[in-house]
Image (cartoon, rainbow, N blue to C red):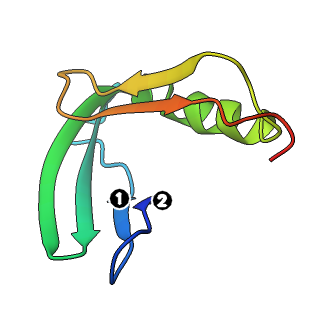
Amino acid sequence: MILASSGPSPVRLVLSAPQRPWQDVVVDYLVTVTGDGLDASAGITSIEGDSLAEYFSGIAERFRGWSGVLEWQSLEGQLRRRRTGPTAGM
């Protein structure tokens, strides 16, 4: 996902394939952010993805715009994603 595109290179957020370290509901991801002089990564933990798929599905289903904010965060708050609805018809 591109987080920002104003600069020499876009800032990208990449989630690794989910890993189940204990073969239960705990899911770990490696999150990497790169671009415009930035290169960082961190591990995040969730329970069954903590509705991450639903978060992205919600954005895709409302591609014409929505009012308010869609939010997601990992189990322990290591990563938060907040998206404000774009203007309808964009």
Q: Position of residue 85 (x, y in %)?
A: 64, 30
Number of other residues with Cα within 10 Å of mark 1, as a class: few under 14, some 14 to 19, many 20 or more: some
Between disc 2 and disc 1, whose residue precedes?
Answer: 2
Q: Kindly identify the amino acid type of the residue bearing the numbered disc 1.
A: Leu
Instruction: List the residue tagged with mark 1.
Output: 13
Label 2 to label 1: alpha-carbon separation: 5 Å
78 to the left or right of 82: left
> Between 85 and 17, which is closer to the camera in this rendering?
85
Residue 38: which quarter of the image?
bottom left
> Between 89 and 43, which is closer to the camera in this rendering?
89
Label 2–label 1 contact, CB within 8 A:
yes
**Residue drawn at 24 percent across, 61 percent down:** 32
Instruction: Please tell me whether mark 2 sits on a helix, a strand or a loop.
Output: loop
Q: Residue furthest right?
A: 89
75 to the left or right of 38: right
Q: Kindly identify the amino acid type of the residue bearing the numbered disc 2.
A: Met
Does residue 58 show up? Answer: yes
Residue 84: which quarter of the image?
top right
Instruction: Please tell me whether mark 1 sits on a helix, a strand or a loop.
Output: strand
Relative height, residue 84 to residue 89 (above, below): above
**Residue drawn at 83 percent across, 39 percent down:** 64
Number of other residues with Cα within 10 Å of mark 2, as a class: few under 14, some 14 to 19, many 20 or more: few
Relative height, residue 1 to residue 6 (above, below): above
Q: Position of residue 48 (x, y in %)?
A: 42, 27
Q: Which mark is residue 1?
A: 2
Q: Position of residue 46 (x, y in %)?
A: 30, 28
69 to the left or right of 81: right
**Residue drawn at 67 percent across, 36 percent down:** 86
**Residue drawn at 44 percent across, 68 percent down:** 5
